[in-house]
Image: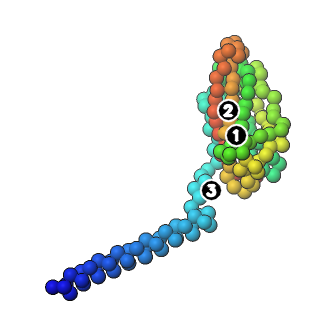
Amino acid sequence: IMTIKSSKAQAALEFLTTYGWAFLVILIMIGALAYFGILTPSKILPDRCNFGVEFQCLDYQIAATGNTFKIRLKSNVNEPTDVSAITLKTESITAYACTTAPANPTGWKSGEIKELTWALCNSGAAGLVSGEKGKVLVSIKHNTVASGATYTKEVKGEAFSSVI
């Protein structure tokens, strides 16, 4: 009776050991794929630029080599708009700061396109590396000319692109 019980225990132990080794090999393979960047989904994702309905993103560029950020926006607000502030940031702990910022558009008419360029930015410190994908979060505070600055609204958007 004792030999039957021990052979069942040995079979169960061998079963668990075999599956344990197989599980360990799978974990090592997943670790190797992640280490070499094959499992990085951001490399596969397409470039995009999203904003609220108030502004339409037409073109954008994140440049680490020139330390610039450029964006072309079209106003979809039905009346002339004044922009009081445009702020940029990244998902990095270090703040994305640019020494030279464009003037805030005033009297921005509906359908009018503005090209905005920030220069002398700390792209590398803010996590924007040339050849990789990067995301810049843009916040625009604006109000219609007729309403005045007491009725300020905020629109948030993002530009996700390959950094050049």
Q: Quadrant of residue 106?
A: top right
For disc 3, the marked residue is 43
Residue 93 screen position, x and y as percent: 68, 45
Q: Amino acid at mark 2?
A: Ser
Q: Amino acid at mark 3?
A: Lys
Residue neighbourhood size for the residue with mark 1, other residues' Cα within 10 Å, grouped as few (<14), some (14–19), many (≥20): some
Coloring scheme of the render? Answer: rainbow
Q: What residue is shown at x 49% (from left), y 69% (from top)?
A: 27
Please indicate, yes or no, whether residue 29 appears anywhere in the rendered image: yes
* Mark nearer the N terminus (1 vs 3): 3
Q: Secondary structure at mark 1?
A: strand
Q: CA distance from mark 2 to mark 3?
A: 25 Å
* Foreground pick, 31 / 61: 31
* Mark nearer the N terminus (2 vs 3): 3
Q: Secondary structure at mark 3?
A: helix
* Foreground pick, 48 / 93: 93
Q: Secondary structure at mark 2?
A: strand
Cβ atoms under marks 1 and 3 closer than 8 Å: no
Q: Give the numbered dot on residue 89.
A: 1
Q: What residue is shown at x 43% (from left), y 71% (from top)?
A: 23
Residue 119 screen position, x and y as percent: 82, 41
Q: Quadrant of residue 9?
A: bottom left
Cβ atoms under marks 1 and 2 closer than 8 Å: yes
Q: Amino acid at mark 1?
A: Lys
Query: Farthest residue in the left direction?
Result: 1
Residue 54 screen position, x and y as percent: 63, 27
Query: Farthest residue in the bottom direction?
Result: 3
Q: Give the numbered dot on residue 139.
A: 2
Q: What residue is shown at x 64% (from left), y 48% (from top)?
A: 47
